[in-house]
Amino acid sequence: MAHLQLEAEEIHRRAVVAVVHDHRPIGPDLELMRVGGVTAKVYQVTVDVDVEAGYPASRDRETGWFRLATGQVAGDALGRGRSGSAQADG
C-alpha cells in the first residue's frame, strides 16, 4: 500500500495541476497552491453571478452572460466599474 502512495505522489509531482474554478482570491492561495503542487490557476476576470440581480435571480439564467462579462471588463478597464446589463442578449 505504501508503494501506491509513493507512486501517486510521484505522478502528482510530475503532473500539471490546474485549478480551473473556485471562489478564492489568488493572493491568500499562492502559498497553499505552492505547497499543494498546483501548477496554474485560471483566474476569471468576470463574475459568474449577476451581482446586481442576485444569485437566486441569475442562477438559472441562460442568456446575457456575454454582455454582462464584456461590460464588467470594459468598465474595469476604463475605471468606471460595471457597465452593461445581462438582460437581453445571447
Image (spheres, rainbow, N blue to C red):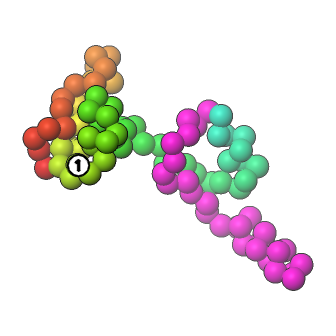
Q: Name the quarter where the N terminus is drawn.
A: bottom right
Q: Position of residue 26 (x, y in %)?
A: 58, 37
Number of residues whose C-alpha sits closer than 10 Å to that of mark 1, classed few (under 14), some (14–19) or many (20 or more): few
Residue at image location 26% in from the left, 51% down from the top: 60
Q: Position of residue 81 (x, y in %)?
A: 31, 20
> 72 above or below 40?
above
> 85 above or below 39?
above
> 81 above or below 25?
above
Q: Secondary structure at mark 1?
A: loop
Which residue does the numbered mark 1 point to in the structure image?
61
Residue at image location 65% in from the left, 34% down from the top: 28
- In the displayed structure, does residue 19 sit left or right of residue 58? right
| Residue 19 belongs to the span the image colors magenta | yes
User: Where, by quadrant of the figure, is residue 8 drawn?
Assistant: bottom right
Q: Position of residue 55 (x, y in %)?
A: 34, 39
Residue at image location 18% in from the left, 44% down from the top: 64
Magenta span = 1-27
Residue at image location 19% in from the left, 38% down from the top: 86
**Residue 72 visible, this orientation:** no
| Residue 11 belongs to the span the image colors magenta | yes
- In the displayed structure, does residue 46 sit left or right of residue 23? left
- In the displayed structure, does residue 48 sit left or right of residue 70? right
Q: Amino acid at mark 1?
A: Arg
